[in-house]
Image (tube, rainbow, N blue to C red):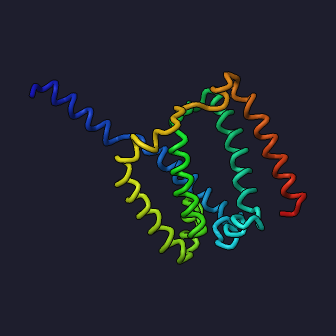
Amino acid sequence: MKESEKKVSAKTSDTEEKEDKRPLYVGLAFGIVFGFLLHKGGATKYDVIVGQLLLIDFTVLKIMLSAVATGMIGIYFMKSMGWVKLSLKSGSVGMNVIGGLIFGVGFAVLGYCPGTIAGAVGNGYLDAITGGLAGIVIGTWIFAIMYPKLKDGILKKGYFGDITLPGLLKVNDWVVVVPAITLIVLVLFWIERAGF
């Protein structure tokens, strides 16, 4: 190997080692804040989550709808300012059905979703530590084993690509975002007035 090639190789390995880790720290900080807010909102408690599944306690729905509205405003504002670029993941009906079934069965059996499991583990709840973490690890392992067979089969059924509603309707993002947020706010007011 020539001397100049060695220098280029050394520089490349130095840049790979000095990769910017700030996004990881920002993600960790947001994850901690998210977990704290889930805890304060009561969404890490088994009774609250089961109450939502039984349609007698709408705390989880209120938290999620508030998060969707806030996130939608934040993301699309940052996109319109040119601060972020959305990287859309393509999807299909098959992916949504399989993902929904796996998520729904785990949610119904244990009473936690992946986010609330993390919060419940942070609270020290044994059911989340044993059943939740074991379920995540075993479920991920089973899906990883089955993925090669699924990826060209059911996961491709009804493939629709990386579309969004504004892209599909060929309109500005805010034409969809504003009515969606208005609808969410109306639903939240209705839930509160109904006493759920």
- Number of numbered labels in the structure image: 0
Residue 161: where, in percent of width, then height?
A: 52, 32
Q: Quadrant of residue 127?
A: bottom right
Q: Going by the picture, which residue comes out furthest to the right?
A: 193
Q: Quadrant of residue 152?
A: top left
Q: Residue at x 69, y 40 (%)?
A: 72
Q: Is residue 8 above or below residue 155?
A: above
Q: Nearer the viewer, residue 102 or 166?
A: 102
Residue 98: where, in percent of width, then height?
A: 51, 51
Residue 50: where, in percent of width, then height?
A: 67, 69
Q: Residue at x 38, y 49 (%)?
A: 147
Q: Nearer the viewer, residue 20 or 149?
A: 149
Q: Is residue 165 left or right of residue 91?
A: right
Q: Quadrant of the C terminus?
A: bottom right
Residue 48: where, in percent of width, then height?
A: 70, 69
Q: Is residue 168 above or below residue 179?
A: above
Q: Quadrant of the N terminus?
A: top left
Q: Residue at x 55, y 62 (%)?
A: 105
Q: Is residue 70 left or right of residue 98?
A: right
Residue 37 visible in the current orientation: yes
Q: Going by the picture, which residue comes out furthest to the top?
A: 170
Q: Going by the picture, which residue comes out furthest to the bottom?
A: 126
Q: Nearer the viewer, residue 10 or 152?
A: 152
Q: Is residue 173 above or below residue 91?
A: above
Residue 40 visible in the current orientation: no
Q: Is residue 109 left or right of residue 192?
A: left
Q: Is residue 1 left or right of residue 83?
A: left
Q: Is residue 45 above or below residue 105?
A: below
